[in-house]
Image: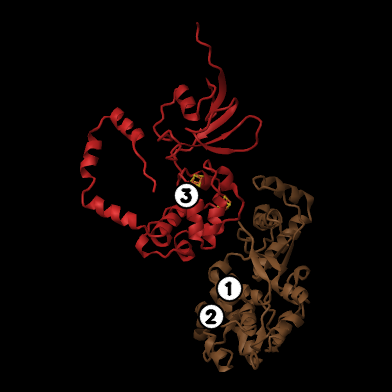
Chain colours: A brown, B red
Amino acid sequence: MNLPYYPGCTLKANASHFEDSAIKAMEILGHQLVEMKDWVCCGTVFSQTDDDLMLHLASIRNLLRAKEQGFDELVTLCSMCYNTLNRSKAFIDSDPDNLKKVTDFMYRENIEYDQDIQVYHLFNILKDRIKYETIEKLVHNPLKSLRLGAYYGCLLVRPKEFAIDDFEEPTIIEDFLRILGAEAIDYPYKLECCGAYQTLTQKDVSVKRCYEILNSAKKANCDAIVTSCPLCAYNLDFLQKEIEKEYVGFVNIPVFYFTELLALALGHTWEASWSELHAVDPLPLLKDKQLI
Amino acid sequence: MAEEKRKMVKVYISGELFEVPEGSTIVTAMEYAGFQLKRGVGCREGYCGACATVYREKGDYKLKGGLACQTVVTDGMALTQIPFVPAEKPTYDLDKLSPDVSTFMELFPSVFRCVACNTCTKACPQDIQVMDYVQALIRGDIAKAADLSFDCIRCGLCALRCPAEIVQYNNATLARRLYGKYLSRKSPELEKRLKEISEGKFDQEMDKLKKMGRKELSETYYKREIKIS
Ligand code: SF4
Ligand code: SF4
């Protein structure tokens, strides 16, 4: 099956291993992620101001262009794109005045935005459409003895209207990790914010947040963390250098995109180019568990 | 037979009303009205980008951008020229740059402020998909940005209209430079020709051209043989 796919900017740069592993894993599952043409950045962060429509144009333009290309749904991998596209859509769709203003403003596009398009996160596709039971049968390299901490962060579960699972006690990632053969570990900080963009202006805030999250996972005996957000992945992985300086005795812990583990469990070889984009080298762990 | 009287149209140039012959371009209309253009005019052929002009037409709410030498006046048009656009223009050494998104993060961090409003595309007199090349840069697709922006004449209208205060054309120029230096297929013919030039193969011919008068030069230009292999 072809799945219309919206990548978002980071997956074309710092998180290209996220995209690459997703495309390859989906191929093994018999599905093609078909990248929509002429997409624009989703706007990155959903704007909370309700009188600046300009900040919602990017999301709506993507939905309009996807529709123009014949798609009535879009799949995202990045939690932030998923969240922003859906929330801007809901915001614009819910107010006829806003809808009219946005439609009028986008007169250069070939069609008008008609609201009739859905945005899904790949997790929902894996669970509800492809089904975890089906994936489980295709696991050739079970991630046995790997103790993994699912990290949801904010964007997959908040606000609750757009949560990919129960917004307070989600298990969709843990269930996924279990079908891959891993041990999914629950730990208290899996829904905490990583500090997000504070990393640019007040790095110490993100360093502290990430330390607390990683430490919480380590105390629960996780071998690694699993996420679907490039910003969370950046903070949790790349800030470990700073954490080491700040918190004496801190030992590094690898951070994976869920698609890397999916591809690996489905029998795809781990690729060197994926490792290059990790700050904490995941290879020693994967070798130790005899997964590569 | 008496010459038929040319039909005139009314135009507002920087707010002042003039009657100019119908069918004039903005440049010829301005000259007809008595303006002596020292800035805001260049090649008069639509190539140089010096004559950026903004205008509104009667009954249309849209603020349009055009090249004064290519845009024909219409009755009731209000226009003003934009001879210069102050722009962010970092200095860089192309040899020290890499053809990826990190270069833009360092030299043009403002490009990441784009909100995808497409105002730049609406303003561009060259019909370039300006927003799409900006977006290509944001995701590090230098080749696509270079390709989409190929016809840019650096008129500056996009940058003037951008709510995110991005200088699109300077970004695009860098993209094309990076593409030319690092990403495009290397041409053995170019290497050969550069060698021939430095060895003086065309010196004599160049000297001959330099000594020609305007008329002879123009004739030679239009009679030239174009070899496409
Ligand atoms: S891209 Fe900008 S500078 Fe280039 S021609 Fe279009 S409006 Fe002018
Ligand atoms: S005008 Fe500026 S903000 Fe709007 S699409 Fe163009 S570059 Fe982006």
* Chain designation of label 1: A
Q: Amino acid at mark 1?
A: Asp
Q: Which mark is residue A20?
A: 1
Q: Is residue A157 visible?
A: no
Is the same chain shared between marks 2 and 3? Answer: no
- Up the image or down, B72 lies above or below A225; here it is above
For the N terminus of chain A, give its image quadrant.
bottom right
Q: Quick one: A178 or B39, which is closer to the camera? A: A178
- Up the image or down, B19 lies above or below A277; here it is above
Q: Which mark is residue B150?
A: 3
* Chain designation of label 3: B
Residue B109: give x, y in percent of width and height.
49, 60
Q: Quick one: A198 or A232, which is closer to the camera? A: A232
The secondary element bearing badge 3 is classed as loop
Tell me the residue that label 2 is attached to.
Answer: A271
Does A88 sit left or right of B188 as displayed? right
